[in-house]
Amino acid sequence: MRIGSGYDIHVLVPGRPLMLGGIRIPSDKGEMAHSDGDVLIHALIDAILGAYAKGDIGSHFPPSDERWKDADSSTLLSMVLDECRPVFSNIDCTVFLEKPRLREHIDIIRESLSRLLSLDVDMISVKAKTAEKCFGELGSGDAVVAAVTVLVED
Ligand code: MG
């Protein structure tokens, strides 16, 4: 087996969509980013690349490259899946977000990831936490963080 971990953070600003796991979550703020800013998919991509020691999202999709401007993160994920051909055991994700509360959206996000990864939804965990008003912008609701761990077959 191989294990990989990924992490990402994006600033949240008004007038942008809040994308998490390929799903748009109703919110008055969304990720500021060169791509669509889907922090959860970005952390997932880094976890997959990490499992296979194939660099990171920045080396594959540099922000300086205009091809990735406003890119659909699901497309970037599918390119990484094509490169790594992972056979997943399971994935475990944590999203740190002050608001909106994600509880009612968790299963929709899991189902979206299940479709994107062709992986049974029972093998996909998505947990949501707040920052308890700590950690500066994260605690004030002006940033979102995602952390992902994947276990894959060698
Ligand atoms: Mg990112």
Image: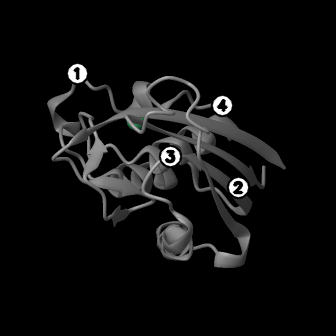
Q: Position of residue 135 (x, y in %)?
A: 56, 25
Q: CA distance from mark 2 to mark 4?
A: 19 Å
Q: Position of residue 9 (x, y in %)?
A: 46, 32
Residue drawn at (72%, 70%) of the image: 123
Tell me if mark 1 has few (under 14), some (14-19) or many (20+) residues whose alpha carbon lies within 10 angstroms of its own: few
Quadrant of residue 152 within the rendered picture: bottom right
**N-terminal-most mark, 2 or 1:** 1
Disc sitting over residue 53 in the figure: 4
Query: Which of the pair 137/112 is nearer the observer?
Result: 137
Tell me if mark 4 has few (under 14), some (14-19) or many (20+) residues whose alpha carbon lies within 10 angstroms of its own: few
Q: CA distance from mark 3 to mark 1?
A: 27 Å
Q: CA distance from mark 4 to mark 3?
A: 29 Å
Q: Position of residue 56 (x, y in %)?
A: 51, 29
Q: Secondary structure at mark 4?
A: loop
The residue mark sitting in front, 3 or 2, is 3
Q: Quadrant of ligand 1?
A: top left
Tell me if mark 2 has few (under 14), some (14-19) or many (20+) residues whose alpha carbon lies within 10 angstroms of its own: some
Query: Which of the pair 154/118 is nearer the observer?
Result: 118
Query: Which of the pair 131/66 is nearer the observer?
Result: 131
| Amino acid type at mark 1 | Ser
Q: CA distance from mark 3 to mark 2?
A: 16 Å
Q: Which residue is mark 3?
A: 97
The residue mark sitting in front, 3 or 1, is 3
**N-terminal-most mark, 4 or 3:** 4
Image vertical order of residue 84 relative to residue 62, above or below: below
Q: Which residue is mark 2?
A: 92
| Amino acid type at mark 4 | Ala
Q: CA distance from mark 1 to mark 4?
A: 23 Å
The residue mark sitting in front, 1 or 4, is 1
The residue mark sitting in front, 4 or 3, is 3
